[in-house]
Each structure stands twice: as C-alpha cells, then as structure tokens.
Amino acid sequence: MNKQATELIASLSRADFGDDFRWGCSTSSFQIEGAVDAAGRVPSIWDTFCKKPGAIRDGSDASVACDHFHLWPQDLDLGQSIGLNAYRFSIAWPRIFSARGAAPNEEGLAFYSDLVDGMLARGIEPWITLYHWDLPQYLQEQGGWTNRDTVSAFVEYADVVTRRLGDRVKHWITHNEPWCTAMHGNLDGMHAPGLRDVPTALQVCHNVLVSHGLAVPVIRANVPGAQVGIALSLHPIKAASDAALDLAAVERHDAFRNRWFLDPLYGHGYPQAPLDYLGTNAPNVEAGDMQAIAAPTDFLGVNYYFPEVVRDDPDGGFLRTSVILPDGRERTDFGWEVAPGCLTELMARIARDYRPAAMYVTENGSCYDDHVGADGSIDDRGRRDYLVRHLAAVRTAQQQGVPVKGYFAWSLLDNFEWSEGYLRRFGLAYVDFDTQRRTLKLSGQWYRDFLLAGH
C-alpha cells in the first residue's frame, strides 16, 4: 500500500470539500452502450474504425461493450449505491440523427429521456456531454470536422437534445477533449477516423472549438438556468532537463497542448508562437470565429491523468519536441505517470491565468491490470490509492483558493477503451464482458465508504 495514501485515508473527509461539491463518475456513450444497431442508431466513425485491421489492439469492437443500453437501470443503481450525487455521461449523436437533414430519431431521444429520469429518481444529478468522439459516419463521409457544415450539424444536434432534455438537465458539456478529437483522430491516427495530416488535424480542432462556441447560446436559450462548459484534456508540461533548449521546448509544447485551447476559449485568441511555426498548416479562421469560441461559459471541465515530460527534438514534428518517459517515476500499468501534485499545480495555474467561474475535475482515473480473486473480489489497491491521493490534491487546490466544485472519477465501469479495446480497465466496478456482471472493486468500495460516511 502506498504510504502517502494510507495516511490520507485517515485524514480525508467528504466534509472537507463543502456541502455543494459534486461527487460523480464519468462514462461515454460509445464505450459502454453497445446496441450499435438498436433503436435507429446509425454507424459512427468509431464503428467504422473498429473494422480497420490493426486499429484496435485486441481486434475487438464496441458492438456490445457493457450493454449499458439495456442494463442502464442496474448501472444507475450501482451509482446510487456508491453515493454519487452526479453522473457525467454522453449522448450518442448517431442515435439522434440518421442523416443530414433527417428528422430527429424519437427512439434515441426517448432512451436518453428515460436515462435522465432514472438518474433523477435515484437522486443523481445528470451531467451531459454532447460530443465524446462518436461522430456519425455519414458526416465523416462529407468531410467530417473539416467541413463547416458539420459545425452547423452539431449546433442543430445540440438544439434538439437540449430542447428535449433541458427541462431536467441543467449541466451541459459541449465537447470532451478536443485535443483527442483533432490530434489522435487526424494527426497520429490512433483514434477514429484514423487520419495523419497536420492541416486536417488543425482545421478539425478549430472547427470543433467554433461548434462549441456557437452551441453555447443555443443551450442557454433552450435551458433556463443552464450551466455550460467544455472538458479539456490538460497536462502540466515538464522539461527533461534544465538545458535551455529543453526549457524552450516546454514553452512550445505547452502553447499547443494547453494554451491552444485555453487561450481562445477565454478570449485571448490562439497563442502567437504556434501560429508562427505552423505557417501554412494553421487553420482557416473565418470572420467571427474567435468571438464565437470565446462565448462565456459557467465552468471548465479539467480531465487530468498525468504530466508530460518533453525535450527539444529537431525531428519531433512541427513542435520540434518529444515526450519522454523518464526512469524511476511511479506509473500505472498503462505507463502513465502517477503525479497527484501536478493536478493541484494544473488547477492553480488555470485559476490564476484564466479565472474560470468554476472548475470541475471531469475525468481522473487510473488503469491497472485487475485480477479477480478466488472469492470474486478485485483488490485494486493501486487504483484506490490513486483515487485517494488525487482527491487530496483537489482538496489542496481548494485550500489554495481554486474554485473547484466537483470530482468525477473515470470511470464507473470497465469499458471499451478506444484503440486499446478491452485490454485496459479504468472502472471502479469490474465488468465481466462475457456475462456482463458488475462487481465493485476495492477502489469503488472505498469511494462508496468515503461518500456515505460523510453524508
């Protein structure tokens, strides 16, 4: 057991965080729902990507995943039993529209309406993410996020969903991790649609941010008292050494990894340094785009997993940097560094530089190779200790005056972990994908005991 975690378990209390703190878990539609052909759903770019040889490490797909589409009542029961007062989930756009210009799919809307009602009946506040990477395939065939019409399609989709659910749902996240949408999907090809092109990736990134900004006033118009934000994947950037070249590499990497999103969202436009070295690869920006992106929001969602250590690398693409994995660092079984103090540092930096009205940790979690004991239990104390230490980091940020108002653990369930398939597990509950049985792990039991003891 981690010594620091042992000491924190004894000192950490739910009451430390305030009575109005949101305690949740996060999931996403493609990773858990399955039922890809049910109730009028059409293919997404991820359904297509899964069929590409070698795209998914174990050759699997998400056609069943956790079968949450059918098993959602027991999953919400699980969340209620843990003591969650909030639950972040995403809408599958391909369940809502089957084609550009088509009427909304009533069966898809009804599914999410029932899901929301199920949460409210269990005392769980629904937090909806409108886009968690599952773009309808028909839009990709028309250029995907490089096509400005996809921006219009997203705003229409946001309008339909918020009109239907806005009487009961007040918390809305437009996009999850635009970095991953753009860069993993269109620069390194790790994610759907699996492209590798710098100008495409940058245009996708820009258009996604524009779609966010244009959707914000639509959501507000449809949802009285709406709380609207966006969830970004953010990383403290550290230098591989004290050498001047590596320190300069940190500035370049941070400007693109973090500030490329934060600066325009908070009205500062894109950082000039990246624009200078991007040259003709820079995205096409239309009149009014930057004003749209800077639409005022009510909160910022921070998805934090690990810091990045970078060095200067003349061969390291347009950033001329390389991310390295220094020896001797504590890591999860996925190889991600465990650095809870960096979460405090990250949130303090955002509060200082951008002054968001509120911040929520909308994802934070860890991947370990779980083993089911002879008695059926899962002793995942590495994940439990990770959770404890990162909650303590949130508490420290609060004590420093950072307006962090909630924490959503990633994830409620083991699920389809994108290009890793079912090889990686992040859940507080173990899923046997053959039987669909859910079993609360030690980490989930600790979270439950922590939440219920203080309530």
Image: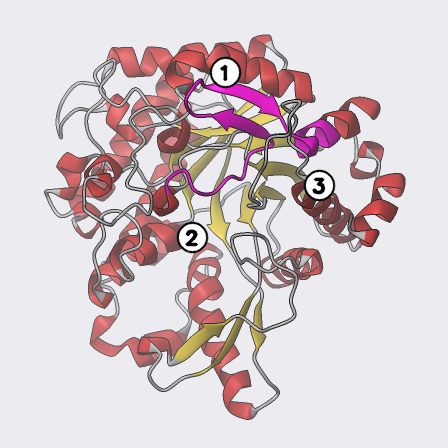
Quarter of the picture containing the C terminus is top right
For disc 3, the marked residue is 381
**Residue at position x 46%, y 59% in the image:** 267
Q: Give, as a single range, the part of the protein colored magenta.
A: 421-447
Residue 443, magenta (yes or no): yes
Comparing 368 with 265, the one in front is 368
Furthest residue toward front: 374
Residue 289 in view (yes/no): no
Instruction: Tell me, for residue 113, which label it has, or none.
Output: none
Classify residue 340 by image quadrant: bottom right
Residue 148, magenta (yes or no): no
Vertical arrangement, residue 284 with respect to residue 324, above or below? above
Amino acid type assigned to the residue bearing label 1 in the image: Arg
Instruction: Tell me, for residue 294, which label it has, or none.
Output: 2
**Residue at position x 52%, y 57% in the image:** 234
Classify residue 348 by image quadrant: bottom right
Q: Nearer the viewer, mark 3 or mark 2?
A: 3
Q: Residues within 10 Å of mark 2 (few under 14, many from 20)?
A: many
Tag 2's secondary structure?
Answer: loop
Tag 1's secondary structure?
Answer: loop
Name the colouring of the figure: secondary structure
Q: Of callouts 3 and 1, which one flags the residue occurring earlier in the amino acid sequence?
A: 1
Q: Is residue 185 left or right of residue 312?
A: left
Horizontal and vertical percent position of residue 61: 29, 34
Q: CA distance from mark 2 to mark 1?
A: 27 Å
